[in-house]
Structure formats: C-alpha cells, structure tokens
Image (cartoon, rainbow, N blue to C red):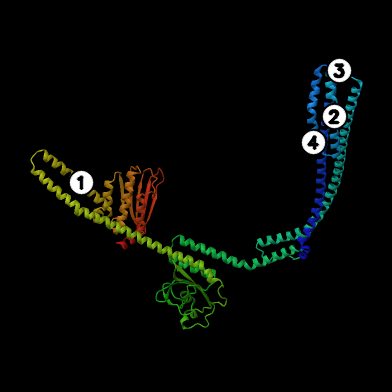
Amino acid sequence: MVRLRQGLTGRLVAASCVLAVLLGSVFAVLLLAVADQRDAAALSRRSEQILTTTSRMHTLVLDVENGQRGYLLTGDRRFLQPWSAAQAQIPRVGARLTDLIVSPARERMAREILDSVHSYVRDYSVPLVALAGRDPKAARSLSLTLEGKRRADEIRAQIDRLSASARAAGIARQEQAAAAAHRAEVAAFAGMAGSALMVALLASYLARSIARPVRRAAMMAGELASGDLGARLPETGVGEIRTLEHSFNTMGESLERNRDELAKLVDEQTALRRLSTLVARSVPPATTFAAVTEEIGELFEADGTAMLRYESDGTATAVALWGQTDASVPEVGSRMDLGERTVPAQVRRTGRPARRDSYADSTDGDRGPRELAVRSAVAAPIEVEGRLWGALTAFSTKDRPLPRDADARFADFTEVVALAIANAQARSDLAASRARVVAATDRARRRIERDLHDGAQQRLVSLLLDLRGIEADIPESRVRAEVAEVATGLTEAVEELREVARGIHPAILSEAGLAPALKALARRSAVPVELGLGVKTRLPQPIEVAAYYVVAEALTNAAKHAQASHVEVTMFEREGRVCVDVRDDGVGGAGSGDGSGLVGLADRVEALGGVLKVTSPAGRGTRIHAELPVSAGQAMS
C-alpha cells in the first residue's frame, strides 16, 4: 500500500477518487432534484385528479338536489331520472376519491364527505321523495326545505376544504421541487468548475509525468526500430514511468545482445529453406549432401564439415566434405577409421549428439583430428526410418570453440538429410517396382501370344484343313454347302484369333523392330497417319515396347474419342533419350484420370525413368510426348 501511494499509479488513483467523489456528489444532487421534480409532477397529477373527482362528486350532489326539488315542485317523475342516476354513480366516484388520496388528513376529509353524501341521500333525499309521493304539501314544508339546504351546504363546504387542501399540497410540493432544482443548478455549476480545475491540474501532471517520458520512450522505440540499438533513456521518471524507462533500456541492451543471434537464426532458417527446396526438387542425394555440409560450415563458422555413412565393419564412408582441404583430409567416397573418442564414434555408440572441445589428450586412435589440428568438434546422428544411418560433423581449428548449441541445432539439418535419403530410396524402390511390373506384364503378353500361336491357333488351322478336305470329298449337295459354311466361319475365327494375338504383343515388333511395327500400326489405323521415324536402328526391347504402346494408345484415342482426321507420329533420338511425339487435330480435352489408358502408359514410361506429357486443350487437338532413356532399357533387357 505504501508503495502504491508513492508510485504514479497511487497518485493517479487518488486524483481519480477526488474527481469521482466531486462528480458523484454533483450527480447525486442532480438525481435528487430529478426525483423531487418527478414526485412533484406525480403529486400535481394526483391533485388534479382529486380536484376532478371532488368536482364530480359535487356535480352528483347537485343532480340529487335538483332532481328531488324538481319533483317536489312539479310532481313530474322525469325529474327523478337524473336523481336516480346520480345516486348510482356516487359509490363509484367515492371509491375513486379514496383511492387517489394518500394523506391521512385528506383521507379523513374524503370519508367525511362520503359519509355526509350517503347520509344526505339515505336520511333526507330518499325519504323526502317518498313523502312527496304520499303528501306533496307536507314534503314542501319549510322545515324540510331548510334541512335539505343545510345538508347540501355542509357537503359543499367539505368538498371545498378538501379541494383547497389538495391545491395547497400541490403548490407546496412544486415549491420544494423548485428549491431542489435551484440547489441542483448551484451544485452543477460548482461541480463543473471544480471538475474543470481538477481535470486541468491532472492534465498538467499527466503531461509532465507521463506524456513527456512516453514521448521520449516513443522516440527511443523509433530509434530502435531504425536499427540504432544503442539508444537509451534517462531514468528520471516517477514510479511506473521510471520502471518503463528502465525496461526500455533493458530491452535495448537485450536487442543489442541478441541481434547477431537473430541474424544467425534467420540465416539458419534460410539455409534450411534452400535445402528443403533441393529435396522437394528431387535432386540427386549427392547434391543435397554437398549443400548441407556447405551450409553447416558457413552458418557455424566451422573450418570443415563432413557427412559420414556408417558401415557394418565399424568404419565410415565420407559422402560429403566441405572446408579445410590438405593431404590429411580424406576424399569423398573414401573409408576412414572412426577412432575411439572422436565425436562420430560417440554418436555411433550412443545414437545421440556429441561434442568435444579439446583433443589435447587424444590417443593414437584419434590421429585424424590431431593431424587436422582440431580444437573442438560436434556431431549429430542421421537416422533414416528409425535406423542410425550416419553422422553430420563439424570441427574448428581456432581457439574459439563452436557454438554451445551447435550439436542441438544440427538436428534440423540431419532431418533434411534423412528426408533426402528416404526420398531417394523411395524413388529407387518405386522405379524398380514399376520396372518389375512392366517386365512381368510384357513377359505375360509374350507367353499368351506364344500359347495362342502355338496352341489354339495351330489346332484351329489343322481342323480347318481337315474340314476343307472333307468338303472336297462330298458331292454337290446341301450337306456340302453347310460344311463349306462351317469352314468359312472357322476361317474367320482363325483370323480373329490371329488379330487378338497380334494385339497382345505384335510379332513384328519382336522380329523386325520398332519402325516396321509402327508402320504396320499406321496401316491398320482408322485415321490417316503421317510417320516421321528418325530412329532406324534397333533399340532395347523395353524401350521399343514402351514406344509402341504409346503410339498405339494415342492412335486408339484419336480414332475413338478425339474425332481426329489426321495424326502425326514423330520419333527421334536426342542426348541418349528416344523421343516419341504423337499429335492429332481432334477435339482435345483428353485426361489421364478416370481409368484412362494414359495412366498405364505413364506408369510404363516412368518405370523406365522416362517422362510422359499430355497436352490436350479443348478444341485444339491432343499431343502425347514421351521421352525414354536408352540406358534404362539396356539395364532392363
């Protein structure tokens, strides 16, 4: 509490409390004045209602008096109608009058009026009307007339007193409300003056104690933002402002200390992004390994870095090197002994990052680091699919050791290496799997073709020859005609079987090569084909089969779906790759999804390490372009 009162917050709280009390008092007076005005208005309305009700009661008494007097003087019973109506309304008006009155004194006056009115009607008016019906002369006697006048005058006097009391109460309440309003005006004026003075004093204090130091802090923040991390504030403020100034100075010192570390972190993230881009582009692993060692060396200001792959015999193979190069540094691809206390040896034993800041006590088994004059070294494990694959290491020959957190920061780079290795292995496995599937498919095609040709087809031909011999021995008759018809059908079946066998794996492709097979394919095409065959020599069988099926699928699509009128087939060899290009002038819009035969073509081409591209804009024809590496076909043959 003492600290709160002495600080800037305590002073602001105290000033705010004074201002709040001052404004609260003013508003309290205003609220009381408003309440008095509201009560005065309510009382005024109630007084008006009381006056209206008493006036109504006075009117009803006059109606009773005039009705009975008219009946006494004329004997006409029509005067009794307003007399009866007035008697019927008197109880309701009386109840209304008692409900409106809340003052005990005026309530007694109202009850006296009601008692007088009821007595006048019950004890005088009703008996007088009844007497007038029996003896009009007696009813018009002077004594009865004077009695009625006295009673009526008494009721009117009571009503006048009640009305005067109600008017006086309303006037008094209005005077009280006016006085309260005057007090409220005075209090409001005094409160506004006091508040304005208090706000002015508080604003002056805030400008001196807060605005000026905050403005200096803003200027310092601008200097810090512009890169001047040496900017500082004079710590002359009060309470929390002094704390703010001290905090700003501390922040400047912290930013100045951490600027280099932040720059290193940015460089590290940039390097990781570059390496991740290499992995995403599926570059060869050796390129990624070389880039990783180079990035590590430059980031951590090492004199040399190396990526090692552990071998089963306890040695390690250098797969990438960067930095210091002399006769003592091994070459990429060479094997080396890990020693006993080197960091790569520790990583192999523990599977965790390792660090060593001195090799002064190294043994003969650690001859490598001593020959390189290594002062400090760090290493981190590279794990691929849960298995320890190798290590990433860096060393320094300077007196200043590598950063303390270098081994931990290596983890991000080893993950990139592991991902590159896993991706390369996955691509290799996928290519091998595709190649095995394509080779098995081709072998199955050739086996089916051979079985059809050597088995069912030869058997059908033999039966056809026997049937033709029987036909020749039968004289002209209906039976001979039927046998001839059967022989013709058998001939067509043999031709259909031959076409099926040719479609499974054309014999001409295996026997004569790709160019004759494509020419035969063009002759059978339903769409005119223009051939441009720039490759005349025989190619490896997998390449010829893949190229043949690319052209066959393209011609089938052009005839069945593209509504083409012309197809161009071009084949040429470039930089060790066979390029097959098929274009048509059809409707376009071809796709490789939804079970299209292009999917199988892509698998076959990619299994050989090739690329298949389909370009088919709507209304502009279709182009299928395949590139097949000849070396891949030779490896699979």
Number of numbered tags placed on the structure image: 4
Category of crowding for the residue at label 3, using alpha-carbon neighbours closer than 10 angstroms: few (below 14), some (14–19), many (at least 20): some
Q: Is residue 284 visible?
A: no
Q: In which quarter of the image is the N terminus?
A: bottom right
Q: What element carries label 1?
A: helix
Q: Is 338 displayed left or right of 434 in the figure?
A: right
Dot 2 amino acid type? Ser
Residue 136 is labelled as: 3
Q: Of the residues under marks 3 and 2, which one precedes in the sequence?
A: 2
**How far across and how far down the image is residue 212, in percent?**
76, 59
Dot 4 amino acid type? Asp
Is disc 2 in contact with disc 4, using a CB cutoff of under 8 Å?
Answer: no
Q: Of the residues under marks 3 and 1, which one precedes in the sequence?
A: 3
**How far across and how far down the image is residue 386, in percent?**
44, 68
Residue beneath disc 2: 119
Cα–Cα span, label 3 and label 2: 22 Å
Category of crowding for the residue at label 2, using alpha-carbon neighbours closer than 10 angstroms: few (below 14), some (14–19), many (at least 20): few
Q: Is 452 displayed left or right of 86 in the figure?
A: left
Residue beneath disc 1: 493
Cα–Cα span, label 3 and label 1: 146 Å
Q: What element carries label 3?
A: helix
Residue beneath disc 4: 99
Q: In which quarter of the image is the C terminus?
A: bottom left
Dot 1 amino acid type? Ala
Is disc 3 in contact with disc 1, using a CB cutoff of under 8 Å?
Answer: no
